[in-house]
Every structure is written in C-alpha cells, then in structure tokens.
Amino acid sequence: MHDFHPPISDAGLYWVVPVPAGALQWSDGGRSATIEMRDVAVIDQPKWPARKAQASPARMSFKMVFEATNTAVTYENKARLFRVTGFLATCRMEARVAVPSIGFTWRSDPIDKCPPAAFAVIGNEINGKYYEEEAGR
Amino acid sequence: MQGCNASAQAAASVRPDSPVDPDGPSGPYPIPWLDKNGSHNQPAGPDLEPSHIYHFKGRVARCSGFNGMGTDGNNERLLFGTATTDYGVMDGEYWAARAPQTGAFTHI
C-alpha cells in the first residue's frame, strides 16, 4: 500500500504545490482544464494518516483533464464566505510514481483507459476577503 | 525589556543578520475552517468549496473518487484510488503579505 502526496506546507496548506508555467492550460472559456506535471517531489507515506508516519521521498508525474458538463452549479455559503459558480465536470487522469529508495515504480493505465472521477467540478471561486468585498459593494 | 510593548519585544528578538519579511510570507495559506479532522483539507463534493486557499478568487477545478489500475515495475497489476482520492487546481489571485498575489497551485 502506497500513498503519494506532497508534504503539508509550513502555512498548513494541505498537499498543495505550485504549478509551473505552462503546465496548466484552460480552454473553452474555462470549461476545460488540462494539467500535466512531471517529476513532482512528493512523499510516499503508506501509514498516512497516522501522525509522523514514515515518509520516503518519491516522484510523481501526472496528467489530469477536466471537462465541464452542461450541468451548472452554484455553491455559496455566506457564513463561510465563499461562492463557486461553474459546472459539474468529468475528470480523468493518468499518473506514474517512483520511490527510488525501495526501487518501486508504478504507472497507471493510459488516461483514456482510466475511469473518470466519481465527482468533479470546474468553474470560478471567490472566498475570504474577496467575497466580503464583493458583498459590501 | 521592561516598558516595551509586544511589537518592540518581537522586533528586538530578530537577529540583525537574519532576513526579515515584515509583511509576512507571500505564499498562500489555508482556509481556516477546513479543519474538521485537524487538517486543512476536505473532500471534493457538492456545496464544498474547491479551493484550498483562503482570500482567493480565480478558476478552480476539483475532483475525487478514482478507481483505476496500473502496473508496477515487476509487471504486477495494482489498483489505485479510493473514494477520497482527490485532486484540485486553483489558478488566480490570492491575498498574502498584505498584497494581492497571483499563482497556480494544485492539490495532489
């Protein structure tokens, strides 16, 4: 059993990493997104979510494609200061990982052979101070 | 340091040769109440915000629930994914270091 993800950042951001220029493409007016990243530094943490679970340096490459359906959605929570406007979507991905310290490699089936995610959404979000500023106008 | 206020005491604790970022780091930070399990994370789903970044406006994409197959280096077929296997993309403007910042980020 393996679990691949970036470490949690000092600020607390959970498994979030910057996307290099050119790795993310939006098209069709924001209704489609393709992200492709190679050799992202991650950790393999088989015992996650146990705290301080042993982690081994690993590399992950992946391609993910989101495409909007025709089902529009709006998620808004005034108490939690966010609004999402967009569409339910399909998302497919392919990935490969490597853990050099144990000689482990794995490659998913090609993206067109992998089932889509059970849930996906694509759109625009506004939260926090930006939401408050817009509400105050 | 008797008579100094908290700010002055904090400033006094900064070593003269250490780098100082007076407005704080410019990287994004998490949504405060995404902390149900002691982690700034939540699954993707209806009525949940896709962004992991607070004070954010921009494009987002979010998904969860993968179940696929792959092949390891020994040519063994291995499953991947669970109901909570989730990914996300955030691309836009966020507020940090007392100024608007721009960037694209992914949750993987």
Image (cartoon, rainbow, N blue to C red):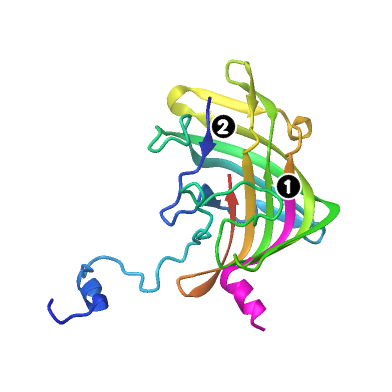
- Looking at this rendering, what residue extends furthest in the bottom direction? A137
Return the x and y of residue A107 as percentages of the image width and height: 63, 28
| Of B44 and A106, the residue lying toward us | B44
Query: Which structural element holds mark 1?
Result: strand
Q: Chain of mark 2?
A: A
Kindly identify the residue that appears in the image at 64 percent across and 60 percent down. Answer: B91
Quarter-of-image position of residue B94: bottom right
Q: Earlier in the sequence, mark 2 or mark 1?
A: 2
Q: Chain of mark 1?
A: A
Looking at the rendering, the stretch of residues picked out in magenta corresponds to: A121-137
- Looking at this rendering, what residue extends furthest in the left direction? B2
Kindly identify the residue that appears in the image at 35 percent across and 73 percent down. Answer: B22
On-image quarter of the C terminus of chain B:
top right
Return the x and y of residue A79 as percentages of the image width and height: 61, 67
Crowd class of label 1 (few under 14; some 14 to 19; many from 20; radius 10 Å): many
Placement of A104 over or under A41, stated as above or below: above
Q: Amino acid at mark 1?
A: Ala
Crowd class of label 2 (few under 14; some 14 to 19; many from 20; radius 10 Å): many
Magenta stretch encompasses residue B33: no
Placement of B63 over or under A45, stated as above or below: below
Placement of B103 over or under A14, stated as above or below: below
Q: Which residue is mark 2?
A: A97
Return the x and y of residue A102 as percentages of the image width and height: 45, 23
Query: Which structural element holds mark 2?
Result: strand
Q: Amino acid at mark 2?
A: Val
Q: Which residue is mark 1?
A: A120
What is the tally of numbered marks visible in this picture? Answer: 2
Kindly identify the residue that appears in the image at 69 percent across and 55 percent down. Answer: B47
Magenta stretch encompasses residue A124: yes
